[in-house]
Image: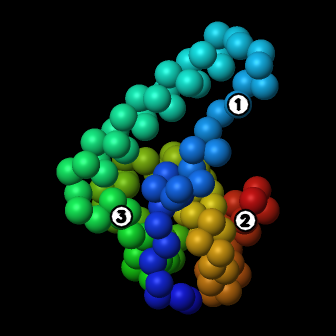
């Protein structure tokens, strides 16, 4: 696993090219999308003005270990979300995929539940 931190996508110079394009056809939804993007961009701008380092760093190694731990056992704070366990596992697995990290073999082979969630990806 690489230790180097990557700037978050929203702080990359190329981010402005990734904003929503309605291809010249405005709809109620596209107008709302633009409003949301503008309000988020304002938050980013304020953050960049306040902080000397405009790019928060993604601590890949720590994040990977946190996600791996969450696949095996969720803390008591998540007890009330027991019915949402499939979704929590899905988002943890999706996060691992975004980090380009494999699902640990021991976890993948543990039971039918995790294998079914992996199948959804």
Left or right of residue 18, residue 8 in this image = left
Left or right of residue 72, residue 45 in this image = left
Identified at 42% across, 35% down, the residue is 40
Quadrant that contains the N terminus: bottom right
Q: Marks 2 and 1: in contact by CB < 8 Å?
A: no
Q: Marks 3 and 1: in contact by CB < 8 Å?
A: no
Mark 1 vs 2, N-terminal side: 1
Mark 1 vs 3, N-terminal side: 1
Circle 1 residue: 21
Residue nearer the viewer, 96 or 6: 6
- In 3D space, how far apart are the residues under numbered discs 3 and 2 (Cα atoms)? 30 Å
Identified at 37% across, 63% down, the residue is 55
Left or right of residue 9, residue 61 in this image = left
Quadrant that contains the C terminus: bottom right
Residue extending furthest top?
28
Mark 3 vs 2, N-terminal side: 3
**Mark 1 neighbour class, 10 Å CA radius: few under 14, some 14 to 19, many 20 or more:** few
Circle 3 residue: 56
């Amino acid at each position: 696993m690489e230790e180097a931190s990557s700037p978050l996508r929203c702080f990359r110079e190329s981010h402005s090219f990734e904003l929503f394009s309605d291809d010249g056809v405005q709809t109620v939804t596209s107008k709302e999308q633009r409003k949301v993007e503008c309000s988020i961009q304002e938050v980013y701008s304020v953050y960049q003005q306040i902080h000397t380092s405009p790019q928060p760093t993604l601590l890949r190694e720590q994040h990977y270990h946190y996600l791996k731990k969450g696949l095996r056992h969720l803390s008591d704070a998540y007890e009330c979300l027991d019915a949402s366990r499939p979704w929590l596992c899905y988002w943890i697995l999706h996060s691992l995929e975004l980090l380009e990290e494999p699902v640990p073999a021991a976890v993948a082979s543990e039971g039918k539940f995790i294998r079914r969630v992996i199948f959804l990806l």
